Amino acid sequence: QVQLVESGGGLVQAGQSLRLSCAASTSILSFLTMGWYRRALGKQRELVATVGRGGNTNYADSVKGRFTISRDAAKNTVYLQMNSLKPEDTAVYYCTGTRIRVATPGLDDYWGQGTQVTVSS
C-alpha cells in the first residue's frame, strides 16, 4: 500500500516561511504527478502546486511567486517551500500523488493525512 506522509506544518507569523515535506513509501518517479492541495476551514479543497514526472510544475495563482514545489527522488520526498506567508494561507495542506494502475487500466490517487499550517497576522 502506497503511503504519503506530510510533515513541516506549524504556526508562523505573516511574512515568514515554512517548508512542507511529503515522504512517499515508494519511488516518487512512479507517480505521474505529485502535488499539494489545501483546505481552509469552511472552504473547498484547492490546488496549491503540482509537479509532473518530467519535472513540469503548476501553481495556483494565489501562491505564484511565493511557493515552490520541488522533489528529491533519492529521498522519495516532495517539498513545498512557502515564503511570504499570509493569513489566508492558513489551511490543512495535503500531499497527493497519481499513479498508473498496474493490473487494470486506470489511475490511482493517493493522499496523505494532512498537516496544519496556521499563519497569524
Image: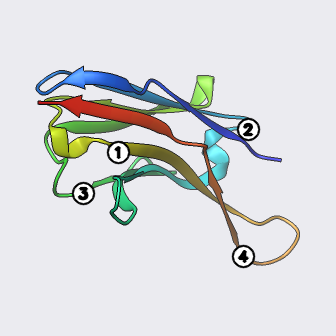
Is the Cβ of the residue at disc 2 closer than 8 Å to that at disc 3?
no
For label 2, the residue is: 26
| Residue type highlighted by circle 4 | Gly
**Which residue lies at the image location 37% right of the left edge and 66% below the top edge?**
44
For label 4, the residue is: 106
Above or below 85: residue 35? below
| Residue type highlighted by circle 2 | Thr
Q: Would you say 35 lies left or right of 11 here? A: right
Picture quarter containing residue 22?
Answer: top right
The x, y position of residue 98, in whole percent, is 60, 59
- Disc 2 residue crowd, few under 14, some 14–19, many 20+, Cα 10 Å: some
- Marked residue nearer the N-terminal end (2 or 4): 2
Q: Nearer the viewer, residue 88 or 37?
A: 88
Is the Cβ of the residue at disc 1 closer than 8 Å to that at disc 3?
no
Q: Would you say 54 lies left or right of 32 here? A: left
Comparing labels 2 and 3, the label whose residue is closer to the camera: 3
